[in-house]
Amino acid sequence: MAFGSGGRAAALLACLAAGATAAGPSIQRSIDHLRLGMALTQVRWLLPPSQPWPSYIEPGGQIRRFRAESRYIKRPNPKVDTTWLGFKDGRLVDIQFIYAKAYGRLHPADNLAADWALIYGEPRRTSDGQYWWSDGRTAMGIFYAEIPILKDGRQAVELRTSLRLMDADLLRTPD
């Protein structure tokens, strides 16, 4: 699902109709044509690489993360600078969009969270300003991602609007 202003109202209504259950709305498991559970080959078909995506395996070896920057994709979404994709057992379990600076200026995290709150209700807000929804199966978060940059020859951090959709069990920590 794209977040453009022209189709946002229609997309929000479609999500409301598709996601509502008797117990409340369930979190949609797809965003911008990517769906949790997809295989890497399906993702590469939707986001054809212009060069190999850098990747790493998380400590513990459970999840392989790919960084698909817009310059690494043949037909990138102009609203997204970087897409992080996490795979476990060959299936997509984590999607994170880090939005382009211009899009983030128009859609700061607080405003984006307010839009999604129309669908999923009030989010849980963390002490560091992140917004999270979960239905027990899927979790979605909106927050500012910290992007390292060089500013005046020194290391600095730039905040960018970010949306993350993931399997809810990734949030659980082992006891």
Image (spheres, grey):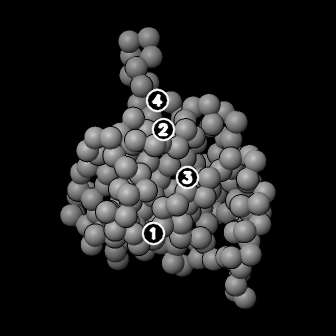
Query: Based on the displayed image, in which of its 4 quarters is residue 17 positioned?
Result: bottom right
Q: Residue at x 68, y 41 (%)?
A: 107
Amino acid type, residue under disc 3 in the picture: Leu
Camera-nearest residue between 16 and 133: 16
Specify whether 145 is left or right of 110. Answer: left
The N terminus sits in image quarter = bottom right
User: Is residue 11 at least partly visible in the picture?
Assistant: yes
For label 1, the residue is 36
Mark 3 vs mark 1, CA separation in Å: 14 Å
Q: Amino acid at mark 1?
A: Leu
Which of disc 4 and disc 3 is earlier in sequence? 4
Point out which mark residue 81 bears. 2
Q: Which residue is mark 4?
A: 157
Q: CA distance from mark 1 to mark 2?
A: 20 Å
Say few, some or many: other residues with alpha carbon within 10 Å of mark 1 (under 14 / 14 to 19 / 20 or more).
Answer: many
Amino acid type, callout 4: Val
For numbered disc 2, what is the local secondary structure? Answer: strand
Question: The C terminus lies in which quarter of the figure?
Answer: bottom left
User: Cα distance, mark 4 to mark 1?
Assistant: 30 Å
Q: The disc labelled 2 sits on which kind of residue?
A: Asp
Identify the mark at residue 163; answer none if there is no mark. 3
Residue 30 in the image: x percent, y percent? 54, 66
Q: The residue tagged with tag 1: helix, strand or loop?
A: loop
